Amino acid sequence: MNASSRPRTLLDPFQLGDLTLSNRVVMAPLTRGRAGTGRIPNATMAEYYVQRASAGLIISEATTISEQANGWLESPGIYTDAMEAGWRQVTSSVHAAGGRIFLQLWHMGRASHSDFHDGSPPVSASAVKIDGDGIHTPFGKKPYETPRALETREIAGVIADYRRAAARARAAGFDGVEVHAANGYLIDQFLQSKTNLRTDDYGGSIEKRARLLREVVEAVSAEWPARRVGVRISPNGVFNDMGSPNFREQFTHVATMLDRCGLAYLHVVDGLAFGFHNLGEPMTLAEFRRVFSGPLMGNCGYTQESAEKVVAEGLADLVAFGRPFISNPDLVARFRHGWPLAEPADMAAWYSPTGAAGYTDFPAHGT
């Protein structure tokens, strides 16, 4: 069997537009809270990403596009000169190690708190509060608050923030950007009927709820070629109190809309490891394959075996791994050589702002 006729494998190279990836293993975006109170990427973060640079592609941790977008303790931003310079240290280190890295652009929307905004409430599509056990703020854990619905006239400013952040990402040396439209953050809050009760041009129908995402992608694509822009969605997810009865129609429309944009990829959180809203049968990669012709990335709960299966079947071109990359910086080598995975990292270490501990101190196999 020649190389062109044999089944594709997870460790085969992949041509992502004009970028050649060494394999189809993607490091998923993982919020780790190591950027300090100034939200400036640092040398420890650079070391962390370099340790994982054997991934075909790294997608950075979610990175806020503005002060309004903040809502997670010590997560990084990309809206000041110092933040841009900090990220440049990360990208140059990853490139020196042979890696490729995209920056994930993030606005938390209602999943924030007034403690992050000098007492002003967080913003969202509509004034719908998260039903959850609370949020960690600079002043301790507190209940979620009812957000303020963005005025129609304010939305252009949010879109401009995405464009400026994308421009800074390019200046910082990233290989591309991913628009975070998943997991109950701002763009997802506009997409879903559960959280979007608007009656203006950004709500009231499937098409109007998708308008913010479309306009953000257009703005970001003015700074980057579309082939260097990815989008992440989570049609099945319940994280941040999401899940809408018409999810299948909404996300089929989203994928169809994005198919016309010539994107680098569509990143679908198709797995159910973060929970499922149980509002119908889960959406599958096969459904998205029917309406999205570009590169497709699966995510959430994949093992090497299940990832190999979707790649071989042509359902996914790339598969993103999150938690396994925390305790296995050499995850690609472990897959390649059949080495066992390390024990999963203790959740207490995931977000602890303690420098190397639980972050860069996981050994490679055999060391």
Image (cartoon, grey):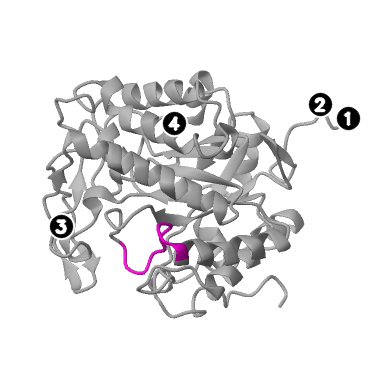
- The C terminus, quarter of image: bottom right
Q: Tell me where residue 178 appears, x and y as whole percent.
A: 49, 44
Q: Nearer the viewer, mark 2 or mark 3?
A: 3
> Quarter-wise, where is residue 188 in the image?
top left
Answer whether residue 237 is visible to the viewer in this image: no
Position of residue 223 relative to residue 84, above or below, is: above
How much space separates mark 3 and mark 1, taking CA atoms? 57 Å
Q: Distance between the residues labelled 1 and 2?
A: 6 Å
The answer to whether the residues at label 1 and label 2 have Cβ atoms under 8 Å apart is yes
Residue 248, how many percent across, how many down? Answer: 34, 25
Q: Of callouts 3 and 4, which one flags the residue occurring earlier in the amino acid sequence?
A: 3
Q: Residue 144 carries which label?
A: 3
Which residue sits at x=43%, y=22%?
257
The circle on residue 5 is: 2
Which disc number belongs to residue 218? 4
The N terminus - image quarter: top right
State the SS at label 3.
loop
At x 49%, y 80%, the residue is 357
- Check disc 2: other Cα within 10 Å, few if <14, some if 14-19, many if 20+: few
Q: Which of marks 1 and 4 is nearer the N terminus?
A: 1
Determine contact: label 3, label 1, CB under 8 Å: no
Q: Main secondary structure of the magenta part?
A: loop
Is the residue marked by circle 3 packed among few (<14), some (14-19), or many (20+) residues within 10 Å?
Answer: many
Number of numbered discs on residues: 4
